[in-house]
Image (cartoon, coloured by chain):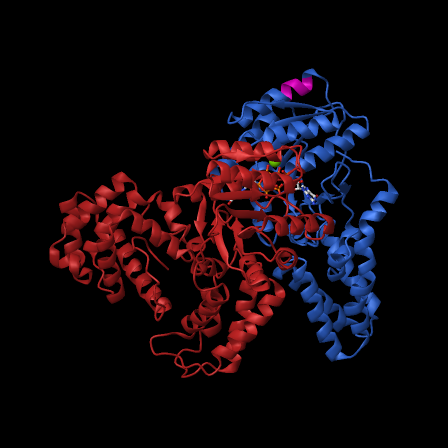
Chain colours: A red, B blue
């Protein structure tokens, strides 16, 4: 239902190619489109307003570089500004020099605090910490029981005490941590509304008394315009140290990230991407920006791919993509990796514009298909593999015969390959000038 | 199912805050500004846009409301500010009215099955407790079904609520097949001559195909066991949800045949405006609103009150809670 920003801008700039400079009225129209995209992604109205003003200033008079279309140029400005706004770099957890470090999780009802306590605990233990989970939620029915189960399921120690106040529970848990050598105490708190003064005061007292190293605001990625209000009040009463954005495994565009970041100016440290305890990932601004703009989560894909391919190979590939010298041979080798990266549909959903891909002619690769594609490519001469443009009709017939497939199948493969190459070109343009951005593995037909 | 309206006094207290602010803020942009000239009108329209967008009504629905207002102004340039204000309110009310007329009472001798669905943490379990409480107050016999066998201590949570309310729960083992629990619960409800069976399901994101299929299966089993059931499938939506609420409604409607929306957590500062967009897109009525964590914090939805609250200012709410 959402149009990608690039598509909207293409409409705006359709007739404007070849202009030396972006003119004000072009920019205004483009900004209107950007505004709609951001609002639909749930970025707060006022945050959008400020942002648009800033982008306008930046875009005016900017020269259109030769290799850029105006769309690419504006997308790049918007993208860079958003990334900047979200903090540029990813930010790690802070630990106290004197154990135990105390991490306190706070937030509205149902945002995901208790589940996140388990995820953080697991994350910490993988990094050789020894965490203790603590529940101070005496409010929600079975809240302590829930944390106990969470701890059990994630193999972590837990402390709770139904009959004591949250403050007392915290003090006791710190004592236990010291005595038993836990170096991080993860404190789960009851969910509360920012308008509930009594409960907000309870939290700020708790914070003053236990002096946590981190006070993390756990927020639901599906939050709309109101994100600014709750985040602001939580930050004002608790001076947060960071944000965790949960439930990003759905299709929420996550504009709340921008809203919350801009009112609190605190780093987003993690994102939650599922209900299991491994579903916690570091936050990368680039990714959420692509998501907000509807440009797909290219970078997550790269990570997945990198886990499947060895580094050197990945580097070589990236080099080829940059030079656009990607050949059918590379294509073939990429296809072999697909199997290791998980189901194709999942991988594709991370791609820019993937919503548009649904009805398209995707190489829906299963084992059998892979074999056929390999057979086709194997039946080509090396010359053909290095330069697909020479593969004419009679060559296609020969290849089909040689691989035991049909000319249609050969055509289809070549078409997919050509589309992939086109996509590489587009991605190269968009990411030009941004260091550290790597490109995805091309094995599907782009747009 | 029909819940009795809350006691007047209590209801009034709950809504008082919002309504008090309404007089100031809605009057300001709409009435005062529309009194003026062209330039003021522009400003007023802009302000109206801001109010609606900030209430999560969404770009498309907001545009529709503003376009219609603009058309009205063009046709009848001399209309008073208050008449224009009424036009806007009526427009939103008409969007909210969808599906409400159709809410007919079903023959009361059949078991009424209420299936409660929604994304993670939206307020399903708590809403069920509140519904059970009201039914009990009305003298109806209600049974709960703990079909969230997935989330940690979800069963225990529902059990504690059931105990507080004084109703029974049918449960299975944690990790067991929810459809099997539903099946058992229906049999038990019929055997015990219950009026209502309310089924709690695990929170699930609407994008997870396998989990949505599971819901479809649960629905199928209910229909097989009781003709015409589930009579009510309630989508519990967190009031702070943004535009994602639209795809939530779309998917849950597709897989579980949602009949209405419960807007939970309306006691914060979020306005729940996405429910307007949902009503507009899918014809789904809002049936109840959750306004707190207590058993009596469930109100029947009132469109006029909701519209008033949409236009109420928030800034003061934060500084003067209750
Ligand atoms: N899909 C998904 N679900 C999540 C994620 N994080 C938490 N949840 C789910 O969200 C729901 C609420 O999570 P909880 O951990 O109970 O939330 P909480 O903030 O502790 O809730 P209160 O204590 O009531 O304020 C549960 O169903 C969790 O399984 C996530 O990243 N993705
Ligand atoms: N302030 C307020 N809190 C609410 C309301 N409804 C539910 N909550 C709180 O929201 C949190 C989540 O509620 P649940 O009923 O557990 O939500 P759920 O949808 O069953 O969650 P999952 O089963 O984990 O998907 C709890 O802390 C509830 O107390 C409401 O109307 N107002
Ligand atoms: Mg909790
Ligand atoms: Mg529940």
Question: In the rendering, at what x and y percent does residue B111 appear?
Answer: 70, 24
The quadrant in which the N terminus of chain B is found is top right
Q: Position of residue A156 (x, y in %)?
A: 47, 35
Residue sitting nearer the eye, B62 or A372:
B62
Q: Position of residue B235 (x, y in %)?
A: 64, 41
Left or right position of B127 against A98 = right
Q: Position of residue B59 (x, y in %)?
A: 61, 61
Identified at 77% across, 42% down, the residue is: B299
Q: Report the number of discs.
A: 0
Is residue B71 positioned above or below A185 on the image? Answer: below
Query: Please, which residue is most extreme toward the top here?
Result: B191
Secondary structure mostly taken by the magenta-highlighted segment of the chain: helix
Against B12, residue A146 (above or below) is above
Q: Is residue B189 magenta?
A: yes
Snapshot quadrant of residue B179: top right
* Left or right of A328, for residue B66: right
B113 vs B129, nearest the viewer: B129
Which stretch did the figure color magenta?
B186-190
Q: Please determine whether, in this image, residue A347 is positioned above or below residue A74.
A: above
Residue in front for this viewpoint, A419 or A113: A113
| Quadrant of the image occupied by residue A325 | bottom left
Q: Is residue B101 visible?
A: yes
Q: Residue at x 82, y 36 (%)?
A: B4
Q: Please tell me which residue lies in front, A141 or B135.
A: A141
Q: Inspect the magenta stretch and tell me whether residue A204 lies in it.
A: no
User: Would you say residue B118 is visible in this rendering?
Assistant: no
């Amino acid at each position: 239902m959402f149009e990608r920003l690039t598509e909207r801008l293409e409409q705006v700039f359709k007739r404007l190619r070849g202009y030396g400079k972006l003119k004000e009225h072009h920019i205004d129209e483009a900004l209107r489109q950007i505004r709609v995209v951001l609002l639909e992604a749930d970025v707060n109205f006022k945050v959008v307003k400020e942002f648009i003003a800033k982008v306008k200033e930046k875009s005016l008079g900017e020269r259109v570089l030769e290799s850029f279309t105006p769309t690419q140029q504006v997308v790049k400005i918007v993208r860079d500004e958003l990334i900047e706004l979200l903090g540029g770099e990813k930010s790690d957890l802070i630990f106290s020099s004197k154990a135990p470090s105390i991490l306190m999780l706070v937030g509205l009802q149902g945002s995901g605090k208790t589940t996140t306590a388990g995820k953080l605990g697991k994350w910490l233990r993988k990094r050789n910490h020894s965490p203790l989970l603590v529940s101070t939620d005496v409010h929600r029915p079975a809240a302590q029981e829930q944390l106990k189960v969470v701890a059990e399921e994630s193999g972590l120690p837990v402390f709770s005490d139904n009959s004591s106040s949250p403050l007392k529970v915290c003090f006791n848990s710190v004592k236990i941590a010291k005595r038993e050598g836990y170096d991080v105490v993860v404190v789960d708190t009851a969910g509360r509304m920012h308008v509930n003064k009594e409960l907000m005061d309870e939290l700020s007292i708790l914070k003053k008394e236990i002096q946590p190293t981190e006070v993390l605001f756990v927020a639901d990625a599906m939050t709309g315009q109101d994100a600014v209000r709750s985040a602001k009040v939580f930050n004002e009463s608790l001076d947060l140290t960071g944000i965790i954005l949960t439930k990003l495994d759905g299709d929420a565009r996550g504009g709340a990230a921008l809203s919350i970041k801009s009112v609190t100016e605190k780093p987003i440290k993690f994102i939650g991407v599922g209900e299991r305890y491994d579903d916690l990932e570091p936050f990368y601004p680039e990714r959420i920006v692509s998501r907000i703009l509807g440009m797909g989560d290219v970078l997550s894909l790269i990570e997945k791919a990198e886990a499947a391919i060895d580094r050197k190979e990945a580097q070589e590939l990236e080099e080829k993509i940059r030079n656009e010298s990607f050949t059918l041979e590379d294509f073939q080798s990429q296809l072999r990796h697909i199997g290791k990266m998980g189901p194709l549909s999942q991988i594709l959903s991370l791609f820019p514009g993937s919503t548009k891909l649904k009805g398209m002619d995707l190489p829906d690769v299963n084992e059998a298909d892979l074999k056929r594609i390999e057979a086709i490519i194997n039946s080509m001469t090396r010359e053909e593999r290095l330069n697909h443009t020479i593969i004419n009709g009679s060559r296609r017939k020969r290849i089909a015969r040689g691989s035991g497939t049909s000319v249609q199948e050969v055509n289809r493969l070549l078409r997919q390959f050509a589309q992939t190459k086109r996509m590489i070109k587009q991605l190269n343009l968009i990411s030009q000038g941004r260091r550290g951005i790597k490109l995805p593995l091309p094995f599907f037909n782009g747009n | 199912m029909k819940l009795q309206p809350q006691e007047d006094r209590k209801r009034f207290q709950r809504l008082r805050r919002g309504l008090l602010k309404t007089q100031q803020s809605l009057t300001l942009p709409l009435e005062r500004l529309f009194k003026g000239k062209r330039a003021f009108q522009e400003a007023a329209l802009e302000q109206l846009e801001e109010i609606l967008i900030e209430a999560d009504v969404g770009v498309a629905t907001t545009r529709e409301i503003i376009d219609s207002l603009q058309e009205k102004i063009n046709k009848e340039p001399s209309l008073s500010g208050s008449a224009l204000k009424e036009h806007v309110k009526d427009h939103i009310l008409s969007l909210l009215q969808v599906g409400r007329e159709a809410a007919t009472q079903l023959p009361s001798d059949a078991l009424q099955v209420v299936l409660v669905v929604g994304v993670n943490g939206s307020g399903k379990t708590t809403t069920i407790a509140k519904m059970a409480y009201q039914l009990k107050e009305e003298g109806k016999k209600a049974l709960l079904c703990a079909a969230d066998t997935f989330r940690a201590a979800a069963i225990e949570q529902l059990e504690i609520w059931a105990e507080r309310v004084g109703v029974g729960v049918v449960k299975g083992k944690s990790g067991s097949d929810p459809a099997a629990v539903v099946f058992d619960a229906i049999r038990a409800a019929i055997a015990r001559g219950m009026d209502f069976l309310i089924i709690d399901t695990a929170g699930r994101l609407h994008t997870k195909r396998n989990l949505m299929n599971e819901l479809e299966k649960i629905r199928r089993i209910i229909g097989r066991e009781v003709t015409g059931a589930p009579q009510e499938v309630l989508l519990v939506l967190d009031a702070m949800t943004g535009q994602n609420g639209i795809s939530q409604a779309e998917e849950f409607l597709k897989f579980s045949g949602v009949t209405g929306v419960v807007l939970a957590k309306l006691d914060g500062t979020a306005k729940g405006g996405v429910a307007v967009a949902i009503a507009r897109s899918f014809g789904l009525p809002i049936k109840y609103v959750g306004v707190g964590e207590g058993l009596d914090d469930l109100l029947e939805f009132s469109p006029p009150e909701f519209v008033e609250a949409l236009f109420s200012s928030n800034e003061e709410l934060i500084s003067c809670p209750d």
